[in-house]
Amino acid sequence: MQSKLGKFHKVAVLKGGPSSERAISLKSGAAVAEGLRGAGYEVIEVDVQRPALELTEPVDGVFIALHGEFGEDGQVQSLLEARGIPYTGSGPVACRASFDKRLSKSVFIREGIPTARYEVLGPNSPLTLPLPVVVKPPCQGSTIGIFKISKPGDWEPAFRESLRYDGEVIAESFIPGRELTVGVIGEMALPIIEILAPDGWYDFDAKYSQGHSQHLCPAPLDKVLADRARDIALRVFKALGCRGLGRVDFRLTEQGELFVLELNNIPGFTETSLLPEAARSEGIGFSELCRQIMEMATLDASQPHPGEKSYVV
């Protein structure tokens, strides 16, 4: 195909990583590498095995396809900043604020962004929220370590399992309703996707197994509600100081209330992933999506992002 490249020509795709989401990241990274090659880039694939940045040859920029710890928490971004290598996605401060749900929730409350009631619990903290609740590790993705608890007898084993990922957990009031997600590319909110998961619970299998969940894109929503969801997604993106790409997950109640669950600053790029699906609905093919994200790669020092300074960790 004819090249549409801008400032980057030889790029590295970071994939794999040391987190519990390594297997998904390997799939995302392989897909991104293929997409970038289709867009005309020279691509080096780097399988990150440990929390370190190991680039064996010079590149113009880096596409980060690392999910979870080291990829989404600001660590690899800080290393790339130190080496002066432009990279895709948000800077270190915004990554940390979006990856750690304790920080995200604080930002949502401060900015008046609708989100579920929650509490942060340590090993000996009692749950005070009424059931049903969702318990989750503060710093995990891909629904790893997340449980919905409806009966008192189910609380303790779920709490202990979730607690093992961190010294604390987030307990959140369960919001019955529909599951929505809004992808963001640059300053554009993509068409909304509604996720129809088995038994209404979007767990790891439903998320990553072909055919386990159904996606409706664009979601069947009236224009006023759809515009509100997209506006809130952009507010979340800005409030957390994000740039480049992200995906904001929502619950929608029968009364038409929207509640933000979280922002994923490096969403999946597998064959079942939501951001590429939303982009296709907007007429953006996979290679073009990868190209657009790659060409937005930057450094904090070279292009300060006002939103990142709005949150102090």
Image: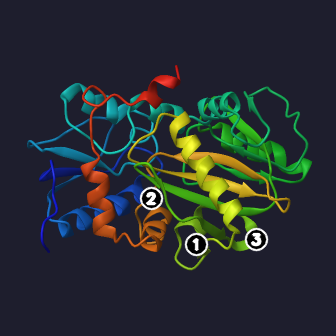
Q: Does residue 84 appear to the left or right of 52 in the view shown?
A: left
The numbered mark at residue 199 is 3
Q: Is residue 137 above or below residue 196?
A: above
Image quadrant in which you'd find residue 218: bottom right
Image quadrant in which you'd find residue 276: bottom left
Furthest residue in direction front, as rendered: 224
Q: Position of residue 75 (x, y in %)?
A: 37, 32
Q: Position of residue 21 (x, y in %)?
A: 46, 52
Work out how far the residue at label 3 is from the one at label 2, CA to CA, in angstroms: 23 Å
Residue 275 appears in the picture as rendered: yes
Residue linked to disc 2: 268
* Foreground: disc 1 or disc 3: 1
- Residue nearest the viewer, comparing 245 with 266: 245
Q: Which is more N-terminal, label 1 or label 2?
A: 1
**Amino acid bearing label 1:** Pro
Q: Does residue 49 appear to the left or right of 206 in the view shown?
A: left
Residue linked to disc 1: 218
